[in-house]
């Protein structure tokens, strides 16, 4: 059992077992966040929205059902590390193809087990998300200090987005999916409804998107700060006037910025499969899967072209927006789930109905 260290920006250090890529003479720097999901670790690890982040899983047993080829949300994981309480060497499930440990090594993701992840979660809740580094056991806090002073950059969306358009044929409505780091289950949700989907890079121009003759636009999830990509806002403003639009997570935040609202960074974000949201027009509460560190500022919506359609029951943050005059709407959470409840899959049907109208 090889020992490595997790050292926090606060100077605190934790020693545990290495369960992933070997980091001898190297390190892995990331933003430390926590996720409360009890299942779905494969989808979480392969979610592009975790680019440059180190994920603490609050559920104590991670890796118990292994990894399979069907549950990936991207081809190449972008997170910087995984922190768990316990990780078995083998998975037990009829779909299991290889262990979580093998998965981490295959994609060169460092991981650490044997830590009190609930203690770490409490620290993040008290002090907010922070930088952390995984290093060999011989590293001291002093050795890690210059590493922790490094910037994580602001090009996460550019790194995880596709570089060239991809067409997924279907006989239904033509949807252009703008890729800010999209999860594959967004595509699957559209394909199950027989949509003809063209996925375009995050920096696609209005003219490029028009050339595909779309009938609707979907803005995807993605990592980082929405204010790091101001160049997409004029494109969103153009497109929402021409086509029905549906926006998810990062897409929701960009939709807000494009229409005069503002965003802010949350202290520790929302990451898990059990977040209740209330639809204000329906008067109903739905359970949702969430993964975001930024939110739309409530007070800024009043001065925008938007109105709040859904709120988070836990902290009253904005979970949904609707344009006052155009067929465009957004949600902060993941209606395509994976992992998480499927309460809000009907939003894809609402989007397609807005196209038909």
Image: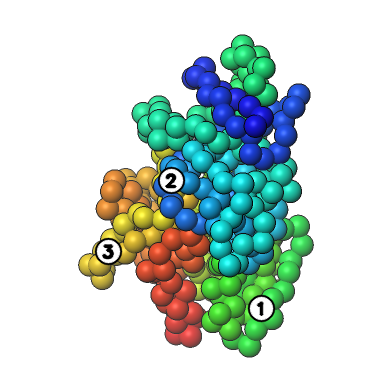
Q: Label 1: which residue?
A: 213
> What mark, if any, has residue 179 been given in the picture?
none
Q: Residue at x 59, y 78 (%)?
A: 191
Residue 22, quarter of the rendered image: top right
The x and y percentages for residue 292 are 47, 48
- Viewer-closest of 238 and 319: 319
Tell me the element at label 1: loop
Residue at 33 percent of width and 48 percent of height: 317
What separation in Å lies between label 2 and label 3 (alpha carbons)? 25 Å
> Which of the two marks, 1 or 3, is nearer to us in this view?
3
Image quadrant in which you'd find residue 72:
bottom right
Q: Position of residue 140 (x, y in %)?
A: 62, 14
Which mark sits nearer the N-terminus, 2 or 3? 2
Q: Residue furthest bottom?
A: 171
Residue of label 3: 285
Task: Count residues near mark 3 (Cα–Cα under 10 Å), then give few for <14, some for 14-19, many for 20+.
Answer: some
170 and 276: which is toward the camera = 276
Q: Which residue is mark 2?
A: 59
In the rendered image, residue 164, in percent from the top left (x then y), is placed at: 77, 62
- Residue 70 occupies which quadrant of the picture? bottom right
């Amino acid at each position: 059992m090889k020992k490595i260290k997790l050292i926090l920006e606060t100077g605190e250090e934790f020693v545990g077992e290495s369960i992933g890529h070997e980091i001898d003479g190297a390190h892995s720097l990331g933003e430390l966040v926590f996720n409360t999901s009890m299942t779905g670790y494969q989808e979480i690890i392969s979610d592009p929205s975790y680019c440059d982040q180190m994920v603490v899983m609050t559920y104590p047993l991670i890796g118990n059902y292994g990894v399979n080829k069907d549950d990936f949300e991207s081809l190449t994981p972008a997170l910087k590390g995984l922190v768990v309480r316990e990780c078995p060497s083998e998975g037990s499930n009829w779909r299991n193809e290889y262990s979580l440990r093998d998965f981490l090594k295959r994609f060169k993701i460092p991981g650490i087990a044997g830590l009190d992840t609930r203690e770490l979660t409490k620290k993040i809740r008290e002090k907010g998300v922070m930088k952390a580094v995984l290093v060999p056991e011989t590293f001291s806090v002093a050795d890690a200090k210059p590493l922790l002073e490094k910037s994580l950059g602001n090009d996460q969306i550019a790194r995880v987005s596709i570089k060239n358009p991809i067409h997924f044929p279907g006989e239904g409505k033509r949807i252009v999916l703008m890729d800010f780091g999209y999860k594959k289950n967004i595509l699957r949700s559209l394909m199950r409804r027989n949509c003809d989907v063209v996925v375009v890079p995050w920096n696609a121009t209005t003219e490029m998107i028009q050339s595909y003759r779309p009938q609707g636009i979907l803005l995807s999830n993605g990592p980082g700060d929405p204010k790091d990509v101001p160049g997409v806002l004029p494109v969103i403003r153009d497109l929402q006037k021409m086509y029905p639009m549906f926006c998810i997570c990062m897409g929701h935040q960009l939709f807000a910025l494009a229409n005069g609202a503002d965003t802010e960074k949350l202290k520790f974000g929302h990451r898990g499969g059990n977040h209740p949201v209330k639809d204000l027009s329906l008067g109903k509460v739905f359970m949702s899967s969430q993964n975001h560190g930024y939110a739309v500022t409530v007070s800024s919506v009043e001065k925008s072209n938007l109105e709040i359609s859904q709120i988070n029951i836990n902290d009253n943050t904005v979970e949904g927006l609707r344009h006052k005059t155009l067929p465009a709407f957004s949600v902060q959470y993941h209606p395509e789930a994976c992992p998480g409840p499927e309460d809000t899959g009907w939003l894809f049907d609402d989007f397609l109905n807005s196209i038909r109208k």
